[in-house]
């Protein structure tokens, strides 16, 4: 087999170019920290990296949805806590009204204070989450969920409805999707309008109706001392029922917050797992890459020296 000088030189140059390409590729990996910069570098690894990246993006979206849910539930829990404090204030006012030394004018003044607390409670029930969604809007509504409605008709007429607070939303719980269903809004109907009524066992009344009864009775100057004592006792029982009812819903928000915290931990771990999978598929092992770079560099230097030595060899050098 006859090996010409030109053929040997071409082969040597091809090997040098391969070493140069290897060095350039390893240098890119070390500089960028990525083992795969193009899908052609490793199609299987690139596919695994894409799947891991998609999982990370889904996880981030779920985390954002979870943050919205946590904010709504925390605000709902705070609103129910504020309502409980207002009802306790109303209870103290009603208890004071039972004092025998109180005049009719004193009781009317207390009635106005209870009426004011009732208005504050309605404002609490209509709070939003700062993003336009009502905390007690049920399954969603663009209108204020709880509204004071005037009487319909006259007392004694067929179809007569006394003044009341009506729920304008859609009953039920509004839930979002953060990988799992999460609470976004409470049911205003059940929270505020379905309180067990001590005066009518087996029936319900709204928190606002219970307070309206107390206001009416405190303003009624025709009651004797016994009737007034019975009315105050009934009013206190109604307030206690409302306090217990709202406390039950507040406990539900606590359970929802605990569930959100647990889901947040699971999402955090899923994000870490996805990042680890992406790094394993795509990132460069710097120790291995630097070691390979030095090996290829040594080989390249040796090839250059060999090529330079061979190029100096010529038949004419021996004929001189």
Image: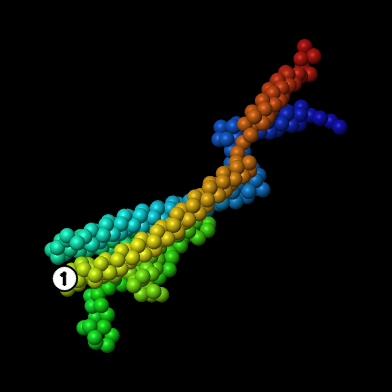
Picture quarter with the N terminus = top right
The quarter holding residue 187 reads: bottom left
> Left or right of 224: which side holds 146?
right
Q: Which residue is drawn at 59% across and 32% down?
A: 30
Q: Which residue is drawn at 49% across and 50% down?
A: 261
> Which is nearer the eye, 280 or 214?
214
Residue 54: tell me if it is visible: yes
- Farthest-out residue, right: 1
Q: Is residue 268 above or below residue 82?
A: above
Q: Name the residue under label 1.
A: 221
Q: In this view, does 91 lie above or below 291?
A: below
Q: Which x, y percent locates residue 172? A: 43, 68
Q: In this view, does 285 lie above or below 45?
A: above
The quarter holding residue 6 reads: top right
- Farthest-out residue, left: 105
Helix, strand or loop at label 1? It is loop
Q: Which x, y percent locates residue 161? A: 27, 80
Q: Which residue is drawn at 43% across and 64% down?
A: 174
Q: Which x, y percent locates residue 240? A: 35, 62
Q: In this view, does 255 lie above or below 211?
A: above
Residue 212: tell me if it is visible: no
């Amino acid at each position: 087999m006859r090996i010409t000088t030109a053929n040997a030189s071409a082969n040597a140059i091809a090997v040098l170019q391969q070493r140069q390409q290897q060095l350039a590729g390893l240098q890119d990996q070390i500089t960028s920290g990525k083992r795969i910069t193009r899908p052609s570098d490793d199609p299987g690894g690139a596919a695994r990296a894409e799947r891991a990246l998609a999982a990370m993006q889904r996880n981030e979206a779920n985390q954002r949805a979870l943050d919205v849910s946590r904010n709504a539930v925390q605000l709902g829990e705070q609103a129910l806590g504020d309502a409980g404090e207002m009802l306790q204030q109303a209870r103290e006012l009603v208890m004071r009204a039972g004092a025998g030394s109180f005049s009719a004018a004193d009781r009317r003044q207390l009635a106005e204070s209870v009426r004011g607390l009732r208005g504050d409670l309605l404002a609490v029930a209509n709070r939003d989450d700062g993003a336009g969604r009502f905390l007690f809007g049920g399954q969603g509504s663009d209108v204020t969920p709880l509204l004071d409605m005037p009487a319909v008709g006259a007392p004694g007429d067929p179809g007569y409805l006394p003044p009341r607070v009506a729920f304008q939303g859609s009953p039920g719980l509004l839930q979002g999707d953060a990988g799992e269903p999460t609470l976004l809004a409470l049911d205003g109907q059940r929270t505020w309008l379905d309180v067990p009524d001590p005066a009518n066992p087996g029936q319900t009344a709204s928190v606002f109706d219970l307070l309206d009864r107390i206001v009416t009775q405190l303003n009624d100057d025709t009651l004797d001392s016994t009737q007034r004592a019975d009315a105050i006792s009934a009013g206190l029982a109604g307030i206690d029922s409302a306090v217990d009812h709202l406390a039950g819903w507040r406990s539900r928000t606590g359970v929802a917050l605990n569930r959100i915290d647990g889901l947040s931990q699971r999402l955090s771990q899923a994000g870490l797992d996805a990042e680890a999978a992406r790094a394993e598929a795509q990132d460069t092992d710097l120790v291995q890459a630097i070691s390979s770079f030095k090996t290829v560099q040594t080989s390249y230097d040796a090839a250059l020296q060999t090529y330079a030595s061979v190029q100096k060899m010529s038949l004419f050098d021996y004929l001189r």
